[in-house]
Every structure is written in C-alpha cells, then in structure tokens.
Amino acid sequence: MLTPRPAWGLRILALGLILLLLHPQPSASGPRPNFLLLLADDLGIGDLGCYGNKTLRTPNIDRLAQEGVRLSQHLAAASVCTPSRAAFLTGRYPVRSGMASSTGDRVLQATGVSGGLPANETTFAKILKERGYATGIIGKWHLGLNCASSQDHCHHPLHHGFDSFYGTPLSLMGDCTRFELSEKRAGLERALGLCAGAAAAAAIAMAVGRLMGLAHGTWAPVILCVASAGVLGSLGRAMGPLVQLADCVLMRGQEIVEQPLDLARAAARVLREAEGFLRSHKTGPFLLLVSFLHVHTPLVTTPPFLGRSAHGLYGDNVEELDWMVGRILSRLEQEGLSERTLVYFASDNGGWLEARVGSQQYGGWNGGFRGGKGMGGWEGGIRVPGILRWPGVLPPGHVVPEPTSLMDVFPTVVKLAGGALPQDRVIDGRDLMPLLLGAEPHGGHEFLMHYCETHVHAVRWHQRERGTTWKVHFTTPEFETPGAGACYGRAVCDCTGSQVKEHEPPLLFELSRDPGEGRPLTPHSEPTYPEVLARVREALAVHVRSLGPAPPGQLDWPCNAWRPWLQPCCGPFPLCWCQREQD
C-alpha cells in the first residue's frame, strides 16, 4: 500500500513555486505564445520510442519529448475519432455536445450527413480568434460539414473559429482506395450484389415457370426483374468510385479543390501548407492545428518510406509521420519561432487492433495496455501519447505521471492566450500549466469518466493522498475468442448489447501497480474495495447530474444518414469530379 510522504510533497511544491517564479506564465498584457498542435490519427502509445518502442524509428517525436514534458497518463475522452476530437476542441465530454452516439454509429459516416459539432459549442480556436490570433487547421476535420444544403457549411471549421482550413472534411479511409480494409464500400457492394442476385433468380424462376406453362400473364415482371438485376449489379460495380468521389474530398476554405483526393500527394501538401502557414504568420500570434491523416488506414506512404520499417506498411507510415513532424518543427526553428511557441503532440485515440488481414497488422501497438481503439474503458483505447514543449518555460525531459486529458488543451491554451473560459457551460478540461511547471504536485482531475458512446464503461479515481489511481469497470467488451484482446471480425467492439458484459460487482484495478489491467482486485484481496467502489459511484452520480438535458444526438439517425442534397460536389450533382489544386 502506498502512503503519502508529506516532507517530499512540501519539497516538490517548493521547487514548483521556484520554477513558477523563474518562468512566470505569460499574461494577456505580456507576450503571448503561439500554439502548434500536432494531432495524429489512430497512433498507438506503444508506437513511439519515447514511450518504450525499440523497433520503430521516431527520432523527431522522441526529441520533442526530450526537449519538453512527456505525459505518461494522457487520456482521450473517447476511443474513436469524432467524439474524441469534439472533446479536444471544446474541453468537454462529447456527450455534453451531442457528439456521442447511442445507436452504434460511433463516428460521422459520410460528408453528406447533417450531423456535426453544433454551432453553439465554443472551441479554443473561436476564443483565440477573438483574442487576435490567426487560427488555422490543416488535415482531417471529421466533425461535420452541412446542415440543410450542400453549401451552408454550418459545421465547417471556418464556423468554429478557424480562419483557414486545408484538408478533408471527413477522414482518410480505406475506401479512398480499394484497400483491403473497407469502411462501407465492401458492405454496399455485398448488399447490392445480393439484391442483384435475388432479382436475377426471380427473373429466371418466372421465365422458367412461364415457359413450362406453370405461370401466365405478361412478360413484364420478368423484364422488370432482369432490368433491376442489371441496374443493381452495375451500381455494385460502381460503388467503389462513387464512395471515393463522395467522401474523399479536399477543400481549401469552403471551396472543393479536388474530388476525389489524390492520396499520393496528400503528405506533401500537408507539409507545404503547414510550412507556408508558419512563414506567413511568423509575426504571430497564431494557433495552428495540424491534424495528420497518418496513421489511419489505408496507410498511404510515399515511396522513400516504403519498406523501411520492421513492421510493414503500418510501421512505414509511422516513420513517415515522424519525418513530417520533424519537417514542421524544423520550419518552426528556421522562422525563429521555437522559443515563442508551445508545441503539443498527441493522438486522438489508441491503436486499432482489429485493423488486420490474415497475419498482416495495419493498426498500432498500445504498449502493455489492454485493448485498443473503440474500447471505451480499457486503457489501450484511450491512453495516448502526450508531449508539450515550450523552450525556456517548460522543464526539458520532465515526465508527468498524473492523469491528464486531451480536454485539458482547451483551458490551457485559452488561459495562456489571455482568454476567459466560458461561464455558461461545464468545462471538463483542466489547465495543465501548474502541473507542467511543477507548481502543483497533482493534476486537476480527481475523477475521469471513460465513455463508450453515451455509456460510461469505466471511471478512474486518482486518490491523491495515497498516490494511487483506481479504475472501476462497469462494462467491458466480449471477445469471440476468450483472451483474443480485440473484437476481430468486426470494425471495433460494441458498446452495448450481447457483445458486452455488465459487471456486478464491477471490476476494480489499481493502475499504479497494474497498468495493464490484468489483475482485478476483489473485496478479499483489497480491503478498501467497498470504500473505493462507493466513492466512485458517488462521483459518477455527481457527473451524471451535471449533464443536464440530453442534446440532439449528432451521430445518431437521422443526423448521421446520407442525404444527396447535403453531398458536397464541385460540379452539378452527381458529376462530382474536379482537379483545381495546383501543386
């Protein structure tokens, strides 16, 4: 059992106060920092050298950690991208904004849907723009586009505080190529193929019956079934290009400049735009969010990196991501901006374990943590890299073991920019600066809720006086093969229904001693089990009461259903093809 060490606690606090005096936080009246936020997609915490990987080469991200502060218990607010990114931008659990699903569609499914980050949500970009910052986002958005027409752009980044946007409004997907792993193309092809087969079989049966004299009447039903089979079969064969045109879109501002997106040039374009933004705004202040398309499937990797890593295409893509981070940081240095810029690096959720075909793994590694992307409670789905660097302000090489969240970026950035947090809503994030500077021995989170859709699967309690972090699991996914560790055969694990297990009494782990969540505690093995469980249930009840009335579900039907009149198209629909981007 861990016990508090008062003397050491006082020494740490004194050291933190000294550091704070030596490096005071900028205020609204003094120089304000720039912000460079680097967000990877589906990167596992175990994929980086600074988090223990010995076989992938990530020298640039590792150097960022050496020069800054590394968060060893950094947590996403959701284990999939759309809700996690909504929480990141707003500092709020996604359930508060309606950006958590309740019907199984965990993320926004297409560009032509009406769901998205509501207009009444406040992002850190919106506040910083009001404070005079130039704000830009490059890369993936995946927080919606239109509401009532294909041109209203109600969910567009430019309506959420960003001055500029260059990237894809949805996400990089396997369906942007004919990749082995498909999000919806393969399912649509199968469904249309079955329907075409059924129509053809009906046509044959009716024709045979008529020829044998078993049926009478006109040939019209036979002709109709034959025509239906032909149309459905043709649609099935065209589904790949149609999905690619609909969802793989490149925009500059509110204009579509390429449809479909040329994946081979995507990485170079992201770098070009990021470096151009830093050159154009070097007088500051600025906020730039580089939302990488790496390392989501289909793992588009340029030729210089193909075959370089020891872990196939996924490893190649990780090493290219690291090179891109290095290029952007080099540009920051060349423009003389490093000393004035707070750099943050993270991933939106854990590595995708189910991204596997045969023996080939196309998803990341989550170190020694259990589970992965899509699993709302297990650590592997929500514990992500978290690195912050600010030369001359943050202590280099420092490691923070306290629980922190992607939601903490919101209050941290807003306060450093001299802004004020919204007072008309609950902000779940906590300012990181006192913890990063050592002015406070503990972070601002005593409890963190771990959601799967709109359901709390687990709760984390940081019992500060004991230096212990408890984790209580109320619900966990069921694997088809016991001990498999992932929901192989499905895209991700379910949050509800027959594929999950409700625990009563709940599972209890002490993450301080068992970070891999392999040894559940019982009332017999842990004397404080009843006390811990009672305290967690009390905190969960308080949290639920703070939610208030449920907002409209942006990820549920009908908001997450494709509608042709919402489909972005650079020509008259359905002639959605253009190449306006000049490289």
Image (cartoon, rainbow, N blue to C red):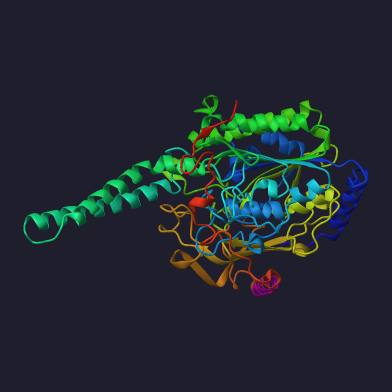
Task: Locate residue 118, reporting x and y percent.
Answer: 65, 57
Q: Nearer the viewer, residue 277 or 25?
A: 277
| Picture residue at 70% right of the left edge, 30% below the top | 275
Q: Is 168 within the magenta?
A: no
Q: Is residue 41 left or right of residue 216?
A: right
Quadrant in which the C terminus appears: top right
Task: Locate residue 156, reporting x and y percent.
Answer: 64, 48
- Residue 149 visible, this angle: yes
**In the depicted structure, whether residue 255 falls above or below residue 553:** above
Q: Is 534 within the magenta?
A: yes
- The span picked out in magenta is 530-543
Q: Residue 506 appears in which quarter of the rendering?
A: bottom right
**In the depicted structure, whether residue 293 falls above or below residue 333:** below
| Picture residue at 76% right of the left edge, 36% below the top | 67
| Picture residue at 45% right of the left edge, 55% below the top | 487
Q: Nearer the viewer, residue 403 or 375?
A: 375
**In the depicted structure, whether residue 406 falls above or below residue 240:** below
Task: Locate residue 50, reporting x and y percent.
Answer: 66, 39
